[in-house]
Image: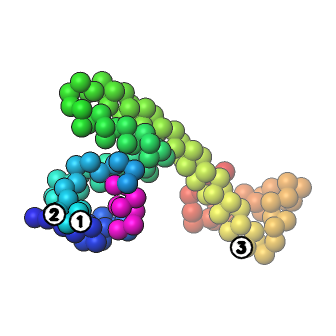
């Protein structure tokens, strides 16, 4: 089955403009063209597009994605480069996950902080000079498992 650029864009959640830009940047050498020069996408192209989007989500620059595509087009002689690239991408994705986990911990703390203040009707509930028993009671009564 073949797809127009519009149908392809719709199916993968990008714009036709983005696909044209990718083609202009050399990211789509696998895409066939009709006699009149229109891009004609085939089913196998969707896996290529998925990996391009995956790499973009890890923050990889388009020029580096193009390098990967070029290596793929070269064949088995570039297997090591492709493997090394994915090891690097994996490490970057894991780093990003750690950054987001740390951010989520801070956000969860602030959710607890403000929820507790709302329940008490004042931000002063977090004042260390207040009665520690009252603060402990608020912690125990909290319905959420937030990180401190």
Question: How far is the residue under mark 3 from the one under mark 2?
Answer: 69 Å
- Residue 83: give x, y in percent of width and height: 32, 29
How many C-alpha atoms fall within 10 Å of the one at disc 3: few (<14), some, or many (≥20)?
few
Q: Secondary structure at mark 2?
A: loop
Q: Which residue is mark 2?
A: 35
Question: In the rendered image, which quarter is residue 5 located in?
Answer: bottom left
- What segment is highlighted magenta in the picture? 16-23
Q: Is residue 112 above or below residue 75?
A: below
Going 75% across and 68% down the picture, which residue do you hit?
Answer: 117
Q: How many numbered discs, if any?
A: 3
Q: Is residue 47 above or below residue 39?
A: above
* Proximity of marks 1 and 3: CB atoms separated by less than 8 Å: no
Closest to the camera, between mark 1 and mark 3, is 1
Left or right relative to 19: residue 119: right
Left or right relative to 52: residue 140: right
The residue lying toward the viewer, choosing from 95 and 134, is 95
Q: Which residue is mark 1?
A: 38
- Residue 115: give x, y in percent of width and height: 68, 68
Question: In the rendered image, which quarter is residue 118 located in?
Answer: bottom right
How many C-alpha atoms fall within 10 Å of the one at disc 1: few (<14), some, or many (≥20)?
few
């Amino acid at each position: 089955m073949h797809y127009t650029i519009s149908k392809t864009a719709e199916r993968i959640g990008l714009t036709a403009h983005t696909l044209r830009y990718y083609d202009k940047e050399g990211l789509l050498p696998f895409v066939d063209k009709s006699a009149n020069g229109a891009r004609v996408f085939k089913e196998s192209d969707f896996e290529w597009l998925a990996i391009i989007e995956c790499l973009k989500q890890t923050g990889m620059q388009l020029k580096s994605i193009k390098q990967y595509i070029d290596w793929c087009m070269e064949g088995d002689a570039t297997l090591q480069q492709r493997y090394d690239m994915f090891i690097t991408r994996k490490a970057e994705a894991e780093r990003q996950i750690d950054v987001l986990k740390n951010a989520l911990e801070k956000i969860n703390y602030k959710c607890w902080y403000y929820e507790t203040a709302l329940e008490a009707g004042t931000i002063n509930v977090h004042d260390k000079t207040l009665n520690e028993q009252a603060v402990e009671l608020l912690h125990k009564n909290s319905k959420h498992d937030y990180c401190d």
